[in-house]
Image (spheres, helix red, strand yellow):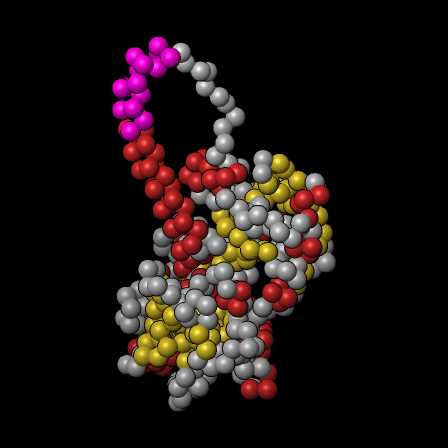
Amino acid sequence: MPNDYYKNDVERFDPGRYYSDSAYTTPAESKKEKRHQRKSVLLAMLAGACIMATVASFVYMFFFYNVVFSPSAASDGETVSTNQTNSGGASPDFDIGAENQNGGMYITPPGTEGGHVLTVNDKYDEKEALSFKSIYRKCAPSVVSISVSNADFTKFVLGSGIIMSEDGYIVTNTHIVNNAGYINVKLYGGGEYPAYLVGADDASGIAVIKIETENLLPAEFGDSKDIEVGESVVSIGNPVEGSFSMTDGVISSLCGKIKYGGYRVTVFQTSAQSGSGSSGGPVINEFGQVVGIINTDMAANYDLENLSFAVPISDAKPIVDELLAHGYVAGRPALGLQLIDIPLSASAYYGMPVGVFVEKVYTNSDAYAQGIARGDIIVSINGVNISSTDELNEVKNELEVGDTVVLGVYRKRELYSVEVVLVDSSEFH
């Protein structure tokens, strides 16, 4: 790379500056031709200016709607805000009730000394199955309705969660609480509380939040290792906020790992249908035990209409325990970058290449040491062309902490190859 690539004072990326110059010139016209065409040129310029202003406004709004407010903004493909504490749990410097840079609220992770872990019970093979009525009466009070907004209340997300402890720890889905400014929890039977993000893990889609109250009814969690295809299950969630509706079905498939957000996540399928607001809610066996956590975002990625995916409790437990103890899950390989998918309209309008935009570089990453800066566009990883953070993650997440990747980096109409060592994602929490 040129020497100036490694300067720490790399100029702020400006698409209008770096990508608006034209490679072509227009031949000069004679004065006579200009006089004859002056009026029409002025009219054409006025019309062109109006059209360009309209197009530019559309592209600007489209680009920044997708970049700033959509889940495309990502840390190595994880859905996060530009506040690094939002990418995997609270900073130890935050106290209960402290306000983050997005206007949201966070809580310091409790640590293992608090004794909070997800307890999984054996399956009751020797006991009789419960009726649907009995399952609902037993389990519905352990389900919550979650509503989330960003800091300026321009985007809202509805989901569900499962109570894990009497003092307010709740497990839900990462895609519900990522980029949250405010999280509100509504209990079965009444009562609403603000919630705090304890930790989130994009590799599994599992997140933990906390509300400040006592005497809640925790769900009973059952071992999902023994579930079988054809086994009767129900799900309880909130397709409409606060509805706490129940649907029944069977376990349709033990499908194993699927691709989700650039990761490979272990799931099972169920025909107990769930609306988007039920994401984060429980899949419950015939004994009233939670054996899975619904993730409707996964099903949406596969265009499934009559089936839902759920993360088995046996796979969710170690993730939840890590989040309760630390606020993050260690051992995930990361580049130390916050990345943004570039909309095709913006790529065409600004003349950008297909790739992902570097929004932020963590200063304690090898990517920073190698000179990668905000405004760069990553177009490939290890020789594989990429057009999204998901595609980048599919390559990166097959590797381990300490491995070296080769990034194709586009800057100011030049393409560079940069070797970057992957580091533990916990370094950026």
Is 27 on the left-hand or right-hand side of 1? left
Question: Looking at this rendering, what residue extends furthest in the bottom direction?
Answer: 215
Is 18 on the left-hand or right-hand side of 133? right
Q: Quadrant where the N terminus lies?
A: top right
Q: In which quarter of the image is residue 177?
A: bottom left
Reply above or below: 232 against 388.
Answer: below
Reply above or below: 254 against 377.
Answer: below
Query: Any magenta on residue 259?
Result: no
Reply above or below: 51 against 148.
Answer: above
SS assignment for the magenta stretch, majority:
helix
- Residue at 36% of width from left, 39% of height from top? 56
Q: Where is residue 249 in the image (x, y as percent from the top left)?
A: 37, 64
Reply above or below: 326 against 4.
Answer: below
- Residue at 30% of width from left, 82% of height from top? 191
Query: Any magenta on residue 40?
Result: yes
Is 245 on the left-hand or right-hand side of 7? left
- Residue at 40% of width from left, 49% of height from top? 64
Q: Quadrant where the C terminus lies?
A: bottom right
Is 372 on the left-hand or right-hand side of 304? right
Q: Where is residue 280 in the image (x, y as percent from the top left)?
A: 42, 67
* Depth order, front residue of 402/295: 402
* Depth order, front residue of 89/15: 15
- Looking at the rendering, the stretch of residues picked out in magenta corresponds to 31-46
Q: Position of residue 77 (x, y in %)?
A: 54, 54
Q: Position of residue 15 (x, y in %)?
A: 49, 41
Res 166 visible: yes
